[in-house]
Image: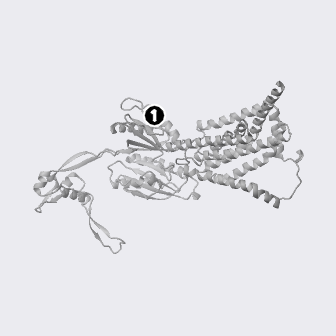
């Protein structure tokens, strides 16, 4: 796990490094400090074995269950079949969406953002009016204590601003509402549930004014542009925009996909003042003079500073035409420019106005032209995995301008852009990379554990018996996630991997104790039962220690999956594998004994 790369690498690395160092120190303490403390602190008692009548209730219960399992073939087979069925039922939970998969769960913060995008060309005053109406509706929620509105400018820097580039928002049609919630201890609702309520409440206002609204939690998850991101590649921008519009509509039709938007501006008129060079030269007016005059009239120009007694810093003096005198082409045409001889000449005599459309912005990723379509997830299935599955069903019906089926890429860009294609990005790519890396790490863990156990027991089959409880932890992990209503996240996998080491250690101790009893002359069946009975209570205490230790992070939104995996996995392993491992070892060793007997008989 320490060598896993990608996004989760820096988050995961302290766990395996810290656990490994702690295990080495605990080994040193177990060999040196614990024996010394036992001699000093514990009373010396005679070496004796517990008699059957002196055994505790848990030991007697264990013997009462295990003896029939080993002696009765039907009960033994029924137990093994039952364990396999439980495992298959647990594995079916993610497929049936009883347990949902997500990269990271939603955090519980005391703030959120509402991003407002009015239609391009909307005035700042109209944007501010609509934004205030949206803010007042959001503030009607009981958990909201106050809000700030930033119209025509970006809000303060935060996670969203840096990752999603909200700090670049400066247009008159753009606004940002910072919504502050009650502290976590003073409200029962999670911030994610509040965000969903606010989204439903303000959406009718956005629909009324044609505004595109996005409710962004802080942080919203992994550092990506948006939860759902579709990148459209193609040979030319026209085909990309055509397909991107269809993909955007597919997003809107998909249940659970909200806050749909795309990185394409609305068509905006553009007026170009073309200078008549000949007339301007005859009048003694330069092109720079005309440009500077227009800039001063429209945007203003600083012509000096004013020293105000009550101001800490000097105030700029800005020269600019009143708004009512710069709202139409006719008004701008009446602006006069001083000629070389001092005559004031209207701009309409020196320029000609050409009307056109502003060119749309062109985005590139890795030197390839791209159009972004974005969205978020809400509702029952709040994971991009299921949202992409739903959108893909809509995309199956989509055709490119050439009539071909839209080609889709999950994790890599298309090598060539000679035809239109789509690549999924956003939280999906992070989810895929994290689960892939963790899966590969877990496979390496299993191989390493197998090699170590083979070297110790000098057998290729006994390690398989020892490692059999690892998948059985899923019998507890997946149903526990379902009962808690929690996502199966990257931290859940970390708990699954970390729990595997604890479980294998218990199995090694159990099998080693069985072989010790056999070397002492005890029959196979008695050795298996006795080892399980003697070691059952220490293993139960180990499970209890893991449960208590993990309980402290059970209610943390991010690390809840880790706690559930450790607690439920250890409980399931203790209850199932403590019976499964002795049964499997008994079957394996009995077959070996019969094989040896046949060989001796044949000899």
| Residue nearest the observer in this picture, 107 or 236 | 236
How packed is label 1: few (under 14 Cα within 10 Å), some, or many (20 or more)? some
Q: Left or right of 485: which side holds 463?
A: right
Give how far across and how far down residue 101 sits, in percent. 57, 42
Q: Please, which colouring scheme is shown?
A: one colour
The reply to whether residue 382 is in sight is no
Identify the element where label 1 is drawn. Answer: helix
Furthest-top residue in this view:
602
The reply to whether residue 306 is in sight is yes
Which part of the image, by quadrant, shows the C terminus?
Answer: top right
Q: Is residue 89 above or below residue 49?
A: above
The residue pinned by badge 1 equals 394
Q: Residue at x 65, y 54 (%)?
A: 21
Give how far across and how far down residue 296 sits, in percent. 24, 60
| Residue nearest the observer in this picture, 438 or 171 | 438
Furthest-bottom residue in this view:
309
Q: Is residue 488 above or below residue 310?
A: above
Furthest-front residue in this view:
603
Q: Left or right of 122: which side holds 180?
A: right
């Amino acid at each position: 796990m320490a060598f896993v790369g990608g996004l989760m690498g820096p988050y995961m690395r302290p766990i395996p490094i810290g656990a490994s160092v702690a295990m080495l120190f605990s080994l040193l303490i177990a060999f040196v400090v614990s024996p010394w403390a036992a001699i000093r602190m514990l009373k010396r008692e005679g070496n004796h074995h517990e008699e059957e009548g002196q055994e505790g209730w848990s030991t007697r219960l264990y013997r009462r269950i295990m003896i029939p399992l080993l002696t009765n073939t039907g009960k033994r087979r029924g137990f093994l079949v039952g364990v396999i069925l439980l495992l298959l039922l647990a594995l079916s939970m993610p497929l049936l969406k009883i347990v949902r998969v997500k990269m990271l769960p939603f955090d519980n913060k005391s703030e959120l953002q509402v991003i407002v995008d009015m239609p391009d060309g909307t005035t700042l005053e109209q944007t501010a009016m609509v934004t205030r109406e949206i803010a007042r509706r959001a503030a009607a929620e009981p958990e909201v204590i106050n809000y700030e509105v930033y119209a025509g400018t970006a809000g303060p820097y935060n996670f969203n601003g840096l990752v999603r580039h909200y700090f670049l928002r400066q247009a008159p049609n753009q606004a940002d509402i910072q919504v502050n919630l009650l502290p976590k201890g003073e409200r029962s609702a999670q911030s994610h549930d509040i965000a969903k309520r606010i989204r439903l409440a303000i959406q009718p206002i956005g629909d009324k004014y044609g505004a595109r609204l996005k409710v962004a939690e802080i942080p919203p998850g992994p550092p990506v542009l948006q939860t759902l991101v579709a990148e459209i590649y193609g040979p030319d921008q026209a085909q990309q925009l055509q397909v991107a519009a269809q993909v955007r509509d597919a997003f809107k039709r998909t249940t659970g996909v909200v806050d749909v938007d795309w990185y394409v501006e609305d068509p905006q008129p553009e007026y170009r003042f073309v200078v008549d060079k000949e007339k301007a030269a005859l009048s003694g007016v330069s092109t720079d003079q005309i440009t500077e005059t227009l800039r001063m009239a429209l945007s203003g120009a600083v012509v000096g500073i004013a020293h105000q007694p009550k101001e800490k810093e000097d105030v700029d003096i800005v020269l600019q035409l009143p708004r009512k005198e710069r709202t139409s082409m006719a008004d701008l045409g009446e602006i006069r420019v001083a000629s070389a001889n001092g005559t004031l000449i209207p701009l309409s005599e020196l320029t000609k106005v050409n009307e056109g459309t502003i060119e749309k912005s062109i985005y590139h990723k890795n030197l390839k032209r791209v159009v972004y379509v974005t969205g978020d997830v809400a509702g029952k299935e709040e994971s991009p995995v299921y949202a992409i599955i739903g959108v893909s069903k809509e995309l199956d019906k989509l055709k490119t301008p050439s009539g071909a089926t839209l080609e889709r890429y999950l994790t890599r860009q298309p090598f060539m852009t000679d035809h239109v294609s789509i690549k999924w990005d956003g939280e999906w790519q992070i989810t895929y990379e994290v689960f892939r890396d963790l899966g590969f790490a877990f496979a390496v863990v299993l191989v390493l554990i197998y090699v170590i156990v083979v070297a110790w027991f000098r057998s290729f089959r006994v390690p398989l018996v020892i490692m059999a409880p690892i998948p059985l932890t899923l019998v507890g992990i997946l149903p526990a996630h379902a009962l808690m209503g929690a996502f199966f996240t990257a931290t859940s996998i970390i708990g699954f991997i970390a729990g595997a080491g604890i479980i294998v250690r218990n199995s090694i101790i159990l099998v080693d104790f069985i072989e010790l009893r056999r070397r002492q002359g005890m029959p196979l069946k008695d050795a298996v039962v006795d080892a399980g009975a003697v070691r059952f209570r220490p293993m139960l205490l180990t499970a209890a220690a893991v449960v208590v230790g993990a309980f402290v992070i059970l209610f943390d939104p991010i690390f809840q999956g880790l706690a559930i995996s450790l607690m439920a996995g250890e409980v399931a392993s203790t209850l199932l594998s403590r019976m499964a491992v002795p049964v499997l070892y008994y079957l394996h060793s009995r077959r070996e004994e019969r094989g040896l007997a046949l060989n001796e008989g044949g000899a």
